[in-house]
Image: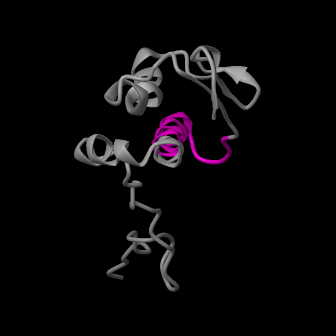
Amino acid sequence: MTAGSGKIDINGRSFEDYFPSAPLQNTVLQPLQVVKLVNSYDVSINASGGGPVGQAGAARLAIARALLQVDDKLRAPLKADGLLRRDPRMKERKKSGQPGARKRFQFSKR
C-alpha cells in the first residue's frame, strides 16, 4: 500500500477485471470507504487459494490491516464495522470410517 490515486491491483490485474461483479468490488473497497480514503492509496495484493468470495474477503482484511499500519487512529471505525476480523469458518475434516465429514456409508438392513 502506497500513497497514490486509488489504483488497486490484484495478482497483477486491476480489481475491476479480477472481480467483475459489483458486490465483490464493494467488498474490497469497504475498508477504504469506511475511513473515507478511497482515492488516497494505491494497493497491490497477491491472492491465492479459495474462490472469488474468499479472496475478496481476504483482500478486504488485508486492506484494513494495512490502513492500521498507516494510521492507528483508524482502528475505531474499522473495528466498529467488523473489518478487522477474519472469517473463522473452515472445512470440516473427513472422519475415518465414513466417506466424508458428516456423511455415513449406506446402511443395509439385509
Q: Nearer the viewer, residue 99 or 108?
A: 99
Q: Nearer the viewer, residue 67 or 107?
A: 67
Q: Is 61 above or below relative to 8?
A: below
Q: Is 79 above or below relative to 98?
A: above
- Dividing the picture into quadrants, the one containing residue 102 is bottom left
Q: Judge whether residue 32 is colored magenta.
A: no
User: Which x, y percent locates residue 27?
Assistant: 41, 29
User: Which x, y percent locates residue 12?
Assistant: 76, 26
Image quadrant occupied by the C terminus: bottom left
* Magenta span: chief secondary structure: helix
The answer to whether 93 appears left or right of 102 in the picture is: right
- Dividing the picture into quadrants, the one containing residue 103 is bottom left
User: Which x, y percent locates residue 68?
Assistant: 46, 47
Q: How is the image coloured?
A: one colour
Residue at x 39% of width, y 60% of height: 89
User: Which x, y percent locates residue 6?
Assistant: 57, 17
Residue at x 65% of width, y 48% of height: 49
- Taking the view exactly as shown, the residue that stands out farthest to the right is 12
Q: Is 96 above or below relative to 66?
A: below
Q: Nearer the viewer, residue 17 or 38?
A: 38
Magenta residues span: 47-64
- Taking the view exactly as shown, the residue that stands out farthest to the bottom is 97
Q: Judge whether residue 52 is colored magenta.
A: yes
Image quadrant occupied by the N terminus: top right
